[in-house]
Structures are given as C-alpha cells and as structure tokens.
C-alpha cells in the first residue's frame, strides 16, 4: 500500500490537470461517471493515503489500496477503474477504491491529522495518543486519524530511530519519547518523499526488512505485532519495551 509520500508524488505529477476540463470519462468504477464529464478540476489534494480530485461541489477520492496503480498520459491493457481525458493528456487509475465525497472537501478531512500537510498539528497527535494509553505504539502510529499518511515502512523506521519497541504501550512511553515519535513521523515522511523521488528509498532503510541491527550488530526480530498484525522489524537490545 503506498504511503503518504508516494501519494504526494502522484499529486505533484498530476497538478498539470488542475484547472482543466474533463473532456471524457470512462472506467468500471461504480460511481456516477457522467457526473464528472465536462467538469473542471478545481484542485488536486492529498490527505495521507487519499488522492483527491476536487470539483465545484464534490470530490473524487481515490485510494490505491494494496495493489492500485496509475498511468499518466498512457494506458495499461486492462480496463481502468477510472479514466479521465483532458485536452492536454489523460489520467488512468487501476485496481483502486473510488468514491464520491459530496460538498466542501474541508468538511470531510481534518488536515491537522496529515503528517505532510502544512496544517499538521503535533499537539493534536499528542492529545490523541493520550486517549489510547493501552494501545501498542505500533498500532497507534498506523492510525490514520492520528498520523494520516504513515504506513508500515515509516512506522518501522521511526520506532527504530526513537529506540522504542513496537509493542510498547502508548501510555507507558515517556513524554519526551512520545514527542520524538510524533516529530519523527513527519520528519521521516518528508525524507521518504525526497528519497523516493531520487529512486533511492530502500538504501536508506535502517530497520524495515533488515535482518541485523546496525547499532548493536544483533539479529532483528521480525514479528507481526499489534491488533493490525503488520510486520515489525526491531531490535530487543536497543529498542526499549515500555509496558
């Protein structure tokens, strides 16, 4: 599943279509495709892992899920879920979730929850974490209503940077560590973005999919942790367990 930085890249790659009229629309999505035809895109936005095509009175929300893909000014052989054609190109989405959000997009999203948005609020994240003291931090960091855009790669890298065991209970983690985790979720997301653009993301991984801790030269533990059962890679020597 693409994480927030990858969706920001998609936004940057498609901003050429903002202000453009949709000349034709097609696809096998269940949404009302005819509603889009002839409409002008007012803005292209992102909220975490959601890609948002904003029109006057509604927004098309696209979630690429686990295997979603897109093509700009080209097509795959398979039928797209959604195809938008403009006078200066086309945009095609495959194997993804597509929904219509009615009215003002600002009524649907809290931009303070998006770790890459200019309105991102670390204080709001801290308050939200305070409300779930018995939840493992590995689940809390993946909560899209607290850290929108953070996925499993960012989770593993941030917790390794912060020396925190993924199965630590949120309420038991010291205040300074909570603040560090919150800050690093945003910091690492922007680093992820730059590395992704340079096609060098994986070479910067210190924990995700790794077998040995670079700090301790000890084997990493690989385990599906928390309620979400997502893969965690961690060192039991330098990542402290707070329970």
Image: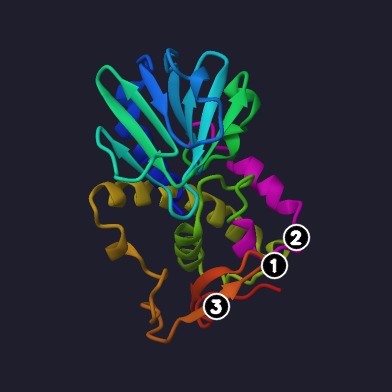
Q: Are the residues flagged by discs 2 and 1 in contact, CB closer than 8 Å?
A: yes
Left or right of residue 30, residue 131 in this image = right
Please name the residue shown 53% across and 33% down the image.
61
Which segment did they paint magenta? 117-141
- Image location (x, y in percent) of residue 151: 50, 55
Identify the element where label 3 is drawn: strand
Which residue is identified by label 3?
Answer: 223
- The tag on residue 133 is 2
Asked if the magenta segment contains residue 136, the reply would be: yes
Which residue is identified by label 1?
Answer: 169
- Image location (x, y in percent) of residue 126: 66, 48
Specify the quadrant that holds the C terminus: bottom right
Depth order, front residue of 127/234: 234
1 vs 3, front mark: 3
- Image location (x, y in percent) of residue 237: 51, 83
Q: Residues within 10 Å of mark 1 (few under 14, many from 20)?
A: many
- Of label 2 and label 1, which has the lower sequence position? 2
Q: Is residue 218 above or below residue 110?
A: below
Left or right of residue 2, residue 202 in this image = left
């Amino acid at each position: 599943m693409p994480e927030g930085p990858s969706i920001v890249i998609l936004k940057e790659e498609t901003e050429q279509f903002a202000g453009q009229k949709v000349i034709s629309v097609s696809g096998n999505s269940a949404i009302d495709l005819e509603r889009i035809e002839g409409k002008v895109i007012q803005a292209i936005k992102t909220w975490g892992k959601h890609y948002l095509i904003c029109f006057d009175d509604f927004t098309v929300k696209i979630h690429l899920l686990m295997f979603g893909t897109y093509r700009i000014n080209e097509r795959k052989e398979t039928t797209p879920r959604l195809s938008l054609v403009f006078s200066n190109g086309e945009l095609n989405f495959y194997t993804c979730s597509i929904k219509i959000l009615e009215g003002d997009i600002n009524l649907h999203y809290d931009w303070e929850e998006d770790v890459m948005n200019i309105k991102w609020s670390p204080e709001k994240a801290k308050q939200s974490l305070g409300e779930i003291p018995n939840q493992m931090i590995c689940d809390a960091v993946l909560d899209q209503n607290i850290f929108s855009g953070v996925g499993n790669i960012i989770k593993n890298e941030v917790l390794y940077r912060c020396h925190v065991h993924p199965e630590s209970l949120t309420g038991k983690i010291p205040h300074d560590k909570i603040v560090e985790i919150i800050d690093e979720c945003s910091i690492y997301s922007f680093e992820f973005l730059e590395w992704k653009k340079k096609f060098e993301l994986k070479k910067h991984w210190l924990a995700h999919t790794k077998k040995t801790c670079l700090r301790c030269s000890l084997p990493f533990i690989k385990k599906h942790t928390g309620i979400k059962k997502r893969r965690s890679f961690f060192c039991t020597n330098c990542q402290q367990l707070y329970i």
